[in-house]
Image (cartoon, rainbow, N blue to C red):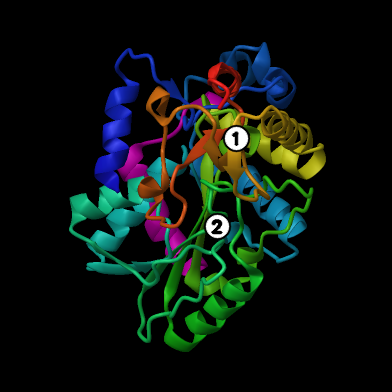
């Protein structure tokens, strides 16, 4: 799977005529509104650029993040569980380094697993063990949780197809954690992008003392040029992980710290990302009604669609089921619903096909 991702990345960086529909970026009309003062004020006028930004020492930010999770998830979160950082990739790197340093050489996971996890596992010699061949959105999904104390990786939602992990499975995992003493890492990078306007994420109910959950405000607002994300961690691990994270990655920029506050304020006090989510839904409906798709999987959250296109496969650069350790979806590819040129290209390629 990792080799396939790396092959796509190599081709993406070369000029070519294939339309990349599975990209990672996003464009939308709400950027300036979401940024607020950051949209037109130099960061040095908003913060002291002569000092390190010390995001982990920002008690106000940690308290704000704790409050927003308590509000959204209806589960009390202490500021002592919040570890802010500069983007999800750096937090994944810190977690995997911690696994390596603590002697963990084997982890279990529910597919799919993000390819950067696969990269770090390969570098650190950690064996990932898949506990099922099925994904949570498939009708016969019924995983057997390991009968041992371990580390389990859980991706929620399944970002490539915009589907959350079923509530019943989350409850099973919580019971299993308590029974085995296992640690769960939730990759919640695409959480809080639900199309039904709901805010609660079910994985917030997993045992706080045995769960790490990663949340990414840059994905929440689809503004990837700023880098911020945070982990909710067991309080007894926060100091160790915070020290490791700072020494591995250094501090974030003042602009990133300011953006972290801005994103938290939008979640707490503003309308959040409602307009963005409505915009994603409108793009989906236009694509669906244009005839550019021959089949599509249901989607409930996020800005990726998993679908089969009417465009000839050889004209597209795309991530297909192999990139997500998936079967039973031949011809399906991930489509970024915020990539207007790709959506227009799919419509044009479909229209140019000869009529049977």
269 part of magenta stretch: no
Q: Quadrant of residue 331?
A: top left
**Residue 47 shown left or right of residue 36 in the figure:** left
246 part of magenta stretch: yes
Q: Main secondary structure of the magenta part?
A: helix
Q: Position of residue 298 (x, y in %)?
A: 65, 51
Q: Position of residue 228 (x, y in %)?
A: 52, 37
Q: Quadrant of residue 20?
A: top left
**Residue 61 shown left or right of residue 11 in the figure:** right
**Residue 279 shown left or right of residue 334 in the figure:** right
Q: Nearer the viewer, residue 235 or 21?
A: 21
Q: Position of residue 27 (x, y in %)?
A: 61, 22
Highlighted range, magenta: 234-255
Image: 168 above or below 328: below
Q: What kind of element bears circle 2? A: loop
| Nearer mark to the viewer, of 2 and 1 | 1
* Residue occupying image coordinates x 38% and y 59%: 240
Q: Is residue 44 visible?
A: yes
Q: Position of residue 326 (x, y in %)?
A: 41, 55
Residue 293 is marked as 1
Q: Is residue 83 visible?
A: no
Alpha carbon distance from label 2 to label 1: 26 Å
Name the residue that disc number 2 marks.
156
Q: Going from the N terminus, do you reach mark 2 or mark 1 first?
A: 2
Q: Nearer the viewer, residue 175 or 141?
A: 141
* Residue occupying image coordinates x 67% and y 11%: 40
* Residue occupying image coordinates x 41% and y 23%: 315
* Residue occupying image coordinates x 61% and y 77%: 171
Residue contact between numbered discs 2 and 1, judged by CB atoms under 8 Å: no
Residue 57 is marked as none
Q: Residue furthest front?
A: 356
């Amino acid at each position: 799977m990792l080799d396939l991702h790396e092959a796509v990345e190599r081709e993406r960086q070369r000029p070519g005529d294939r339309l990349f529909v599975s990209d990672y970026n996003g464009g939308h009309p709400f950027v300036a509104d979401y940024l607020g003062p950051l949209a037109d004020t130099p960061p040095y006028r908003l913060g002291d650029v002569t000092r390190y930004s010390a995001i982990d020492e920002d008690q106000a930010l940690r308290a704000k993040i704790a409050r927003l999770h308590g509000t959204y998830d209806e589960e009390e979160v202490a500021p002592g569980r919040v570890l802010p950082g500069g983007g999800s990739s750096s937090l994944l790197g810190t977690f995997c380094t911690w696994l390596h340093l603590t002697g963990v050489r084997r982890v279990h996971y529910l597919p799919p697993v993000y390819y950067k996890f696969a990269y770090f596992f390969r570098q650190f010699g950690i064996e990932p063990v898949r506990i099922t061949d099925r994904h949570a959105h498939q009708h016969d999904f019924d995983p057997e949780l390991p009968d041992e104390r371990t580390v389990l990786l859980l991706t929620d939602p399944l970002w490539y197809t915009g589907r959350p992990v079923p509530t019943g499975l989350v409850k099973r995992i919580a019971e299993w954690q308590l029974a085995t003493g296992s640690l769960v890492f939730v990759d919640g990078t695409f959480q809080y992008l639900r199309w039904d306007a709901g805010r609660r994420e079910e994985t917030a109910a997993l045992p706080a003392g045995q769960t790490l959950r990663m949340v990414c405000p840059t994905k929440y607002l689809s503004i990837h040029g700023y880098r911020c994300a945070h982990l909710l961690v067991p309080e007894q691990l926060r100091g160790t992980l915070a020290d490791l994270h700072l020494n591995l990655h250094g501090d974030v920029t003042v602009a990133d710290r300011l953006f972290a506050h801005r994103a938290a304020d939008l979640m707490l006090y503003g309308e959040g990302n409602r307009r963005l989510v409505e915009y994603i839904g409108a793009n989906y409906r236009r694509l669906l009604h244009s005839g550019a798709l021959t089949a599509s999987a249901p989607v409930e959250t996020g800005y990726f669609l998993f679908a089969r296109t009417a465009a000839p496969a050889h004209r597209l650069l795309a991530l297909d089921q192999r990139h997500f350790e998936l079967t039973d979806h031949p011809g399906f590819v991930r489509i970024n619903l915020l990539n207007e040129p790709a959506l227009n290209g799919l419509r044009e390629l479909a229209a140019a096909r000869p009529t049977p």
